[in-house]
Image (cartoon, grey):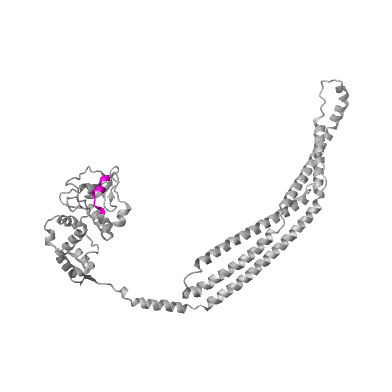
Amino acid sequence: MILPLGFDRFGQSAKTLLGQVQALGVIRDVMRRRIELDAQYIAGLEALAEEYINLEPNEVIDGLLKPVLTQIKEEIQCRISANHDIRTLVENLPDITEPEQDTSTGLTDLMNAKKGYQDVMEAEDVAKSSQSFLEAWYARDFEYNLQIDVSRRLPDEDWRYRKSVVAQQTNAKKARLWFFKYPSAINQHQEHIERWWSLLKRASITNSNLVSSLSCHISTCVNQLEAFSPLPAITLVTEAYEEDTESQIFQPTVYRNYCIGGVVSDILFGADLFLPKSRLEELVSKLGESHFLGLYPWKIAFEIEQGSGGITRYMELLRSSFNMNVEIVLLLELLHYNPLLPLKQDIPPRSLNDSTPRRELVSLLDLDLEKDALSSRRRRRLAHQISMVIVPREYMTTGRPYYSSSVFWEKWDFIGNRPLPAGIKRYYSSEKRKVVVVVQKTGEEYNPSHWEELS
């Protein structure tokens, strides 16, 4: 099979034209995408300027930020104008969709014609190599014609050859019809290229003018910033600092105890005193002694407080010794927040027992003390601290003799001010020799995060 000269490059005209038309499509997409990105950037600048343009003026804002914001506003206007001009140019360009589709169709026709020609050459080679067979078949055809039961079908070699020639003739006709339009397609393509060329030059000029305008505005901003001096701003800050330094607000205030005539006094009560775990059980037990209030009235407490040296001195005494004065102070601290778990007054004596359901415990408490923000937090901490070192007594948390608090001790979350979750219980571990709160099924200790935050 001998193919004609230039067979391999046949159709290059349509391939070249289609490649260039598609390249124009890429340029179109790039320009449109650039326009949208510019619009998004402008919207971002507008939002930025809108957010900060109305800040209350001061020396630093006026001297440093205002020139920058002014430059941003001017940049916005320049970019809006440039974006509008380029968008108008792109929108007015001719549509290349139809030329692209037409060229693609023409390329398909040319390739079909090329394939059809090759099929004809191959089929002709087969028929030519079978010429002896075909001539013998033809010579016997008359004899076959007398036999009605013999097939009258043409030999495959000739049949395929005929079909390929017909197909090639059809494809060649379609290819010629498109190719006759090729000169006009070239002219249209040249017009499109020139218009796109002109667009890109004008768009580049627009961008060049934009850069020049931005450069001018930035130069103005730079000059304004160069004129700024940090000295006035630092001077104002320094003067304000010196004024605040002399303020009486920095000086610690004194406490005057108006319960005893407004005399100046140190403060212990109200400072959330530290209660040592080693003395808690002993201290709590004294709250149940009937003669306690008679022994230690607030008059003695205030006298101790006046000469105590405050909470710092109290902590020193607590570490070095545990004298009577320290004990009185600690007992009154506990008394101030007692009852740590207040029961309602109308609860019948001894009505609480270990079988009381957790869900009923809340209804037994007088929670009005929770409304006192100055005491509720401290009261919870104290109740929790005591519950973790002391096995319950009747007076431990309720502050009322003959009212058992063991059910609360076992089932109550003192810090969360709610029952412990089902399956969680507080008890004294002989093995660990301390009070623990555990998950009964697993034996793991229960220590929720809100205990650590408040305790």
Q: Residue at x 61, y 59 (%)?
A: 36
Query: Which residues make up the magenta segment?
Result: 358-367
- How far from the left and from the top, in percent, is residue 120? 81, 39
Residue 333: image location, x then y, percent: 20, 61
Q: Is residue 213 above or below residue 430?
A: below
* Residue at x 47% of width, y 76% of height: 59
Judge left or right: residue 83 versus residue 185. Answer: left
Residue 169: image location, x then y, percent: 82, 40
Q: Locate residue 32, reporting x and y percent.
A: 64, 58
Residue at 84% from the left image edge and 35% from the top image edge:
128
Query: Residue 110 vs residue 80: left or right?
Result: right
Q: Which of the pair 114/99 is nearer the observer? A: 99
Above or below residue 5? Residue 156 is above
Residue 227 in the figure: left or right of residue 333: right
- Rendered view: 390 above or below 70: above
Q: Main secondary structure of the magenta part?
A: helix
